[in-house]
Amino acid sequence: FNRVPVLALSGNHETYGCTAKPVVRKWMLSAFAPKREEGSSAIPNDILSYIPEELWDYYGEDFAPLDEGFYHAIVLRDVLIIALDCMDDVFRTRHYRAHTGMLLSPRQILWLSDTLKKYENDPRIRFRVIAVHVQLYTSTHGPAQQPLTALLEPYICRYKINLVLSGHKHALEVVHRQ
């Protein structure tokens, strides 16, 4: 069992609770995550070019991040696994009275774009997986995270993501790409 890779993914229960204060410090999860390669630290003026137009209203103001964000990528043999932190922009989410986990920080969006570009033509990569805590689609009680879906769908389609994993609803649902 000690050779089975474990990749930590933050969600609402263990990270922020209802107070916008981390319940579990994300550095405690760092043992289960590779060191993230950072892209540019500055948010470019053209950040909206990375975001679908229907979501621009959510990105009109700048918010200080709660922490550094717990998103990372790992390559296991021929699989690229990208773990996103849909809880890293909690202040923006609360400001716009949005559902928890439906927005990613501008810094994470840039990192995701850079990471997918980096591996787009890598001959070693046969499968691409994105793991994110909240669901993009659901038939269970409560809404799917429409803004997060609108944000990620262009990346999922453009970079031919083979699998998206989520667990917020605590239910097994399988959705096939149309």
Image (tube, grey):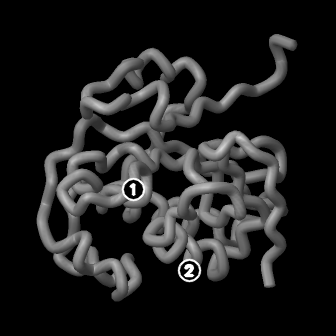
Residue on which the image places disc 2: 154
Residue on which the image places disc 1: 99
What amino acid type is highlighted by mark number 2? Pro
Going from the N terminus, do you reach mark 1 or mark 2 first?
1
Circle 2 — which element?
helix
Which residue: 77% across, 42% down? 76
Which residue: 56% across, 29% down? 33
What amino acid type is highlighted by mark number 1? His
Pick the quarter of the image with the C terminus: bottom right
Q: Do tag 1 and tag 2 residues touch (Cβ < 8 Å)?
A: no
> Residue 142 in the image: x percent, y percent?
56, 57
The one of 13 and 60 positioned closer to us in this rendering = 13
Determine which of the numbered discs, if any, sits on residue 24 in the image.
none
Asked whether, in this view, residue 61 is left or right of residue 12, the answer is left
> Residue 2 in the image: x percent, y percent?
81, 12
Q: Residues within 10 Å of mark 1 (few under 14, many from 20)?
A: some
